Each structure stands twice: as structure tokens, then as C-alpha cells.
Image (cartoon, grey):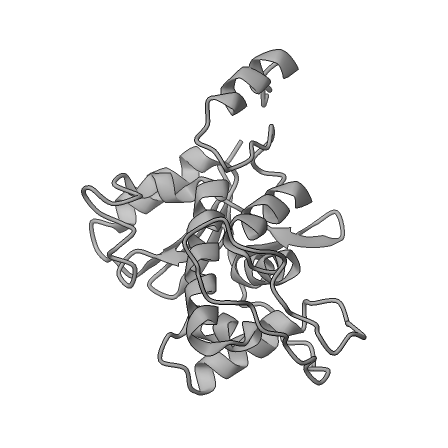
Amino acid sequence: MRKHLPAALAYVVCSALSAPLVCAQTVDRLDPVVFERIAERHGVPADVLYALARTESGRTQKGEHKPWPWTLNIAGQGRYFNSRAEACSALRAALEHTRLIDVGVAQLNIRWNPDLFGAGKRFSDPCAGLDPQHNLDAAAAILRSHFDDTGHWLTAVGRYHRPAGGAAAHYYARAVASRLAPRSSPSAYRSAGSSVASHSSPVPQQTAIAPTHWIAPVAMVWISSGD
């Protein structure tokens, strides 16, 4: 049986977390406020960050397709797990054979993000990358950096998937765009606000994109604990 912290104790634990991240009392349920606070911190649109997370780790529960934090992609094979402990165990086992592993809700790749994973880095313990808030925070920083380089959020989204750009980046951007609610404003996809992180460039207006066709998520393998 899953146990939850009493509300008062949860508040104390959450208060001890490093600001400005926000604490969700149940980390397997990523409340909108989590995305909003992290998006605001980095000056990215919260809906774009959420759509990116759905594309990376989305799982359908009770008829809703939502990001799932205990997700790994090991050498091209996507897997969902029931808990952080199960995902962590699988991650440690996989690292004995490969570093081509995408981790967590925003699928941060260990091999291609050496500035994040490793001794003395943000995720010195690779399982720390499973923390949904810290994972999202790192992803938002990457997304913002690509926006600073390109000046367009959906181009930045594509570069998040493939920094070199090209067809793979374009295809991925369309997948994320298909999960965004339609907007009527020509200034759609401007920043959600000024970043409180170290970004000095102004946020230009973005033009709305043409409607895109639905692109199905990559098939995932559900890993059960056997309970």
C-alpha cells in the first residue's frame, strides 16, 4: 500500500527543498503549478513545456494522456515503471551496458548531456535525474537556451530533441505542436514571462503555426512490479 506524508510533514519537507522549485506532495501527479513555476523561472511557455513532457514521457491514465516521471528509454526502448525505486533499479542495471539512456519526465539523455550527469554535476547520482521537478527544471533550461539561439519556440523544441536540427527536429516539433491547444493570437508562443535565471536577451513575439496532424507517441513497454 502506498503511504503519503501527513500534510503538515509534507509542508516541512517541501519547505526544505531548494527554491525556486515547487513541491508536489505526490510526485507521480505533476500538478499544473509545477510546470507553471518552472516555466516562469526560465521564461518559457508553460504549455510548451507541458506538451514537450507529454511527448517525451506521456502515458494514458484514466483516459488522460499525461507526463509520467518514472520513464526510461534504454538504447531506443521506452519503458514505464510503477515507481521511482523500480525505475532507479533499472537505470543502474542499464548503465552497466550503455549510456544511451533517456531519463525521467523530460527524457534527459545521459550520454548527450555530460554537463548534467556525472561526478560533480547536477545529477551526480543518475537516479537523481528521475526527480520530476529537477528533471523539468533542467529541461526548461535547455529549451530556453535553444530559444535564445533560434528566437522561435517550436524551433527550440525541435533542437531540444536534436540540437543539429534537420528533419528529425522538425518532425519532433510537429509532434509537440500537435499537443498544444490552438491559439488565435498572432503572438502565440511568446515567453510565459521574464526568466529569473540568467537570460538577458529579450523575448520576441512568435507567429502562430499552421495546424498539424496528430503524431502518435512512440510505443512504450509497461514494466510491472509483479505485485
Side of 120 where 116 appears, left or right: right
| Residue occupying the point 52% across, 61% down | 56
| Residue occupying the point 57% across, 63% down | 55
Residue most extreme to the right: 184
Estimate the x, y position of residue 80 in percent, counting from the top left.
Answer: 50, 50
Q: Say above or below: 5 vs 174.
A: above
Task: Looking at the picture, tell me which residue is in the foreground, 5 or 84.
Answer: 5
Looking at the figure, which quarter contains the N terminus? top right
| Residue occupying the point 58% across, 50% down | 40
Query: Total marks drawn?
Result: 0
Side of 127 where 18 appears, left or right: right
Asked which quadrant contains residue 194, the reply is bottom right
| Residue occupying the point 47% across, 63% down | 143
Side of 175 where 209 appears, left or right: right
Task: Looking at the picture, tell me which residue is in the foreground, 115 or 108.
Answer: 115
Q: Say above or below: 15 vs 209.
A: above
Res. 216 visible in picture: no
Res. 38 visible in picture: yes
Estimate the x, y position of residue 173 in percent, counting from the top left.
Answer: 55, 76
Estimate the x, y position of residue 171 in percent, counting from the top left.
Answer: 53, 81
Q: Say above or below: 13 vs 136.
A: above
Task: Looking at the picture, tell me which residue is in the foreground, 195 or 78.
Answer: 195
Estimate the x, y position of residue 59 in percent, counting from the top left.
Answer: 61, 54
